[in-house]
Image (tube, rainbow, N blue to C red):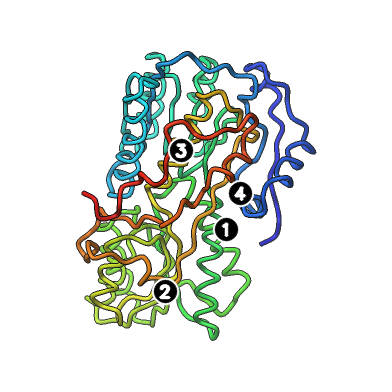
């Protein structure tokens, strides 16, 4: 992908926090000085990359009050993020570093999420972590948190406020890479069904941006139809069945960015259609379906997993509370790739086609501490962090 890091200056809002604006060349220098694996994540990234607004922030004294603003808890992936984040924060509660952990859920109502964030500000939270429901609509609430000296740290989708710290991934690159995998599997071209997530979500726009770029580069692939599965299994299965019922032409691949590849495969089998190549994020139920039906499941994707999403969010948040200073406002986390030939290495006996709440756990930390250190001034080991304590995929 063409390198196009978007860099902005943040003078006005950063000044409110007592932080001098970092020059554009300085931001570029920070990115270019990162380890190669991290630096590559900024190539073609659609997020605005700027300086951290928290370089001069003094964290409050312990114990801290940890608040988490969720925009949706309607699928197992999002529930698992919250469960893992709670497990990690509970460890800090046990050692006296954190006094409480509070979660709000706006159920895809952006206005409600704004109100919940402002309520967290009024409660005097020490930090607010979040999976945001909008890239732009939360900005005033994020700025209000900054004015109250409360960091707002996002995961699984960035916000555009210059006062946020976004722990994110290059979803445009992911969308691009998955179409590229389809290109490679279908050198003579074919028809692709596009199954997107929640309409309006910032990640959805980024993923489709990358996919469209790759589609423009290979004219042999044709989009059969685009539908929204809302990253939810029953919705995805319904819209896929509707799409293939009204599209008698062959569908050679399904580009989907959620954790619902198993129900996509089931929909094609139910309709008596040949198994397409499916992209997306690997899950336990998909691995179970593959094990039981190896001729009906073909996968090329990544492991965009809820455990490490929660873990990187936690680690950045607790490092900030520990006094470490993020260098940038957007900290990009690599998404591990998973190919069809890798499936035997990810499968475990507890994974069945019904195991919708089971997500694979990478055998090693996808974001080792030495990589995370590169994002911080004054870096030191993350308090309360031990990847070896990540619950086994089969632990219930």
Horizontally, residue 248 falls left or right of residue 320, namely left
Q: Nearer the viewer, residue 157 or 220?
A: 157
Compute the Cα span from label 1 to label 3: 20 Å
Residue 340 numbered tag:
2
Residue 46, label in figure? 4
Q: Which is more N-terminal, label 4 or label 2? A: 4
Q: Earlier in the sequence, mark 2 or mark 3?
A: 3
- 102 versus 248 height, above or below: above
Query: Hey, which quadrant is residue 123 in on the image?
Result: top left
Q: CA distance from mark 2 to mark 4?
A: 28 Å
**Image depth: mark 2 or mark 4 in front:** 2
> For numbered disc 1, what is the local secondary structure?
helix
Is label 1 or label 4 in front? 1
The image shows residue 324, relative to residue 311, as above or below, that is: above
Q: What residue is disc 3 on?
A: 313
Q: Residue furthest bottom?
A: 188
First of labels 4, 3 by sequence position:
4
| Marks 4, 3: nearer the viewer | 3
Q: Nearer the observer, disc 2 or disc 1?
A: 2
Q: Between residues 58 and 50, which one lies in front from this camera angle? A: 58
C-alpha span from label 2 to label 3: 29 Å
- Point out which mark residue 173 bears: 1
- Secondary structure beneath label 4: loop
- Nearer-N-terminus badge (2/1): 1
> In percent of the image, x 32 and y 83: which residue is there?
274
Task: Report the number of numbered marks.
Answer: 4
């Amino acid at each position: 992908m063409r390198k196009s890091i978007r860099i902005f200056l943040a003078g006005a809002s950063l000044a409110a926090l007592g932080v001098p604006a970092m020059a554009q060349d300085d931001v570029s220098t920070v990115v270019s000085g990162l380890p190669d694996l991290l630096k590559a994540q900024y190539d073609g990234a659609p997020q605005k990359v700027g300086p951290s607004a928290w370089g001069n922030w003094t964290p409050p004294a312990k114990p801290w009050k940890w608040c988490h603003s969720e925009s949706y808890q309607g699928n197992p992936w999002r529930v698992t993020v919250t469960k893992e984040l709670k497990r990690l924060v509970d460890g800090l509660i046990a050692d006296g570093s954190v006094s409480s952990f509070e979660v709000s859920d706006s159920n895809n109502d952006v206005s409600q999420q704004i109100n919940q964030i402002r309520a967290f500000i009024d409660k005097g939270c020490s930090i607010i972590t979040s999976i945001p429901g909008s890239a732009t609509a939360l900005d005033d609430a994020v700025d209000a948190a900054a004015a109250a000296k409360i960091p707002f740290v996002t995961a699984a989708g960035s916000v555009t406020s210059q006062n946020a710290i976004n722990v994110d991934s290059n979803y445009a690159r992911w969308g691009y890479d998955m179409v590229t995998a389809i290109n490679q599997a279908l050198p003579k071209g074919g028809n692709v069904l596009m199954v997107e997530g929640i309409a309006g979500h910032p990640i959805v726009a980024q993923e489709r941006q990358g996919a469209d770029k790759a589609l423009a580069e290979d004219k042999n692939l044709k989009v059969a139809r685009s539908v929204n599965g809302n990253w939810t299994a029953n919705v995805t299965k319904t819209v896929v069945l509707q799409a293939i019922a009204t599209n008698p032409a062959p569908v050679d691949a399904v580009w989907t960015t959620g954790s619902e590849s198993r129900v996509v495969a089931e929909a094609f089998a139910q309709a008596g259609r040949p198994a397409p190549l499916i992209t997306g994020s690997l899950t336990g139920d998909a691995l179970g379906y593959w094990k039981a039906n190896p001729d009906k499941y073909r996968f090329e994707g990544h492991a965009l997993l809820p455990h490490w999403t929660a873990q990187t969010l936690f680690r950045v948040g607790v490092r900030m509370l520990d006094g470490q200073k993020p260098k940038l406002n957007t900290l990009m986390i690599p998404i591990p790739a998973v190919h069809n030939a890798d499936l035997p290495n990810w499968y475990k006996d507890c994974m069945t086609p019904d195991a919708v709440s089971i997500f694979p756990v990478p055998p090693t930390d996808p974001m080792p501490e030495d990589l995370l250190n590169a994002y911080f001034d004054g870096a030191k080991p993350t308090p309360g962090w031990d990847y070896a304590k990540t619950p086994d995929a089969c632990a219930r």
